[in-house]
Amino acid sequence: MKEFEYSAVMEEFEQWKAQGLSLNMDRGKPCLEQLELSRGLLSVLDFDDCVADGVDARNYGELSGMPCAKRYWAELLDVRPEECFVGGSSSLNMMYDLVAKAWSNGLLHSPRPWSQEERVKFLCPVPGYDRHFRVTESFGIELLPVKMAGSGPDMDEVERLAADPQVKGIWCVPKYSNPDGFIYSDEVIRRIAALKPAAPDFAVIWDNAYCVHEIQGDYVPFPDILKLCAQAGNPDLVFEFASTSKITLPGAGMAVMSASEANIKYLSKLMGAQMISCDKLNQLRQVRFLKDKAHTLELMKRHGEILRPRFEAFLQELEEQIKPLGIARWTEPKGGYFISLYTAPGCARRTVELCKEAGLVMTGAGAAYPYGKDPEDSHIRIAPSYPALKDVEQAAKVFCTCLKLATLENSRK
């Protein structure tokens, strides 16, 4: 970009500011059109029809979830019902609870609770999901970044770091990773399943949040990590999580933890001290509404039809305005909820600041890195799902102006 372009881009920026815009692309939330797809969820259950498999969903009991809900998740994740613990609306809450149990009691193979260890570390593929990092950080666990590639985390680095007995686990979003939208390769998945970490209670937290969340193309089948771990002699290594938050209604979803039967039994004993069960009525209505995997995939095609134009609109603007300038690169995901964009070093934070000035709220630069610190200040997470399509189109134009201006400012330093 030439220096003489600065005044033109600044003028464009001031024009956006003068419009008094109020656009928000901070989080990857389903839009109202997507929520409408699950309107029937609120009327699918009748008070006199709340019994399934001999279990009354209105009453106490069934700590690990309704049997029909376990079967639903078993089919969706290609696991066995006995390997499922069905929870409430939030898989993040279940992940937090797993770390909390490890901290207070230890996991199945822990020599002692993590709180009694001299030091606890956790591997964080970057860029990654900021809320994952906040969970472990909230316990004072040291976060160790591991670089991501198109095939998944750098497994040479993972294996090297896991040789430290203080390293107790790794966060993974294996399908349409948050925020890059990558799918872990079969080789990476096999290497994770075959890990031989020094810590006997090393935990792979496998957040399969986007397991059926294609934006383009047909459903992509995905390996069963539990089965691969068992075959590799690591049956208790992995804890897989998923939810219906972005399938039905985020405010009233159904989450699941899938793990070995030994892990489920051990954790159920600990959970029995804190609750009798999660919301079984909600579990039952989710199953009645979603029915099975085939019906769920049909619903997800409709989600994809709503999301696709939003992603395409933002990507098209980047293609037209930014690609010819060569000042950034970005991912083009086939599923999930995010686009990752990489600016020149030192430009991400300023780009987001300028967006805010122009009336566009983005996820904070650096949020996808432990402690919110992107060492190159180059990553921006783009979440085009929630705004109306016309607002996404406008937001993309504002963003491109701000990216150009931030890059020009940086080149003038």
Image (spheres, rainbow, N blue to C red):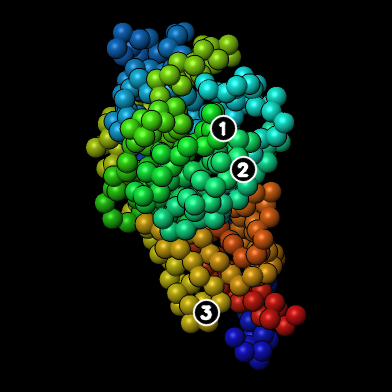
Residue linked to disc 1:
199
Residue type at the position of mark 3: Gly
Measured in 3D between alpha carbons, the distance from the residue under mark 3 to the one under mark 2, in whole angstroms, is 31 Å
The one nearer the camera, 208 or 399, is 208
How many residues crowd mark 2 within 10 Å: few (<14), some (14–19), many (20+)? Answer: many
Name the quadrant of the N terminus. bottom right
Q: Can residue 105 be seen in this view?
A: yes
Residue type at the position of mark 1: Ala
Task: State which tag comes first along the sequence, 2 or 1.
Answer: 2
Do callouts 3 and 1 mark residues in contact (Cβ within 8 Å)?
A: no
> Residue visible at 45% across and 74% down?
319
Asked which quadrant contains residue 5, the reply is bottom right
Residue linked to disc 3:
326
Residue type at the position of mark 2: Phe
> Residue visible at 56% across and 41% down?
163
> Residue visible at 59% across and 29% down?
99
Q: In the rendered view, does 202 fall on the left or right side of 227?
A: right
Do callouts 3 and 2 mark residues in contact (Cβ within 8 Å)?
A: no
Task: State which tag comes first along the sequence, 3 or 1.
Answer: 1
SS of the residue under disc 1: loop
Residue 133 bears which disc, if any? 2
SS of the residue under disc 2: helix
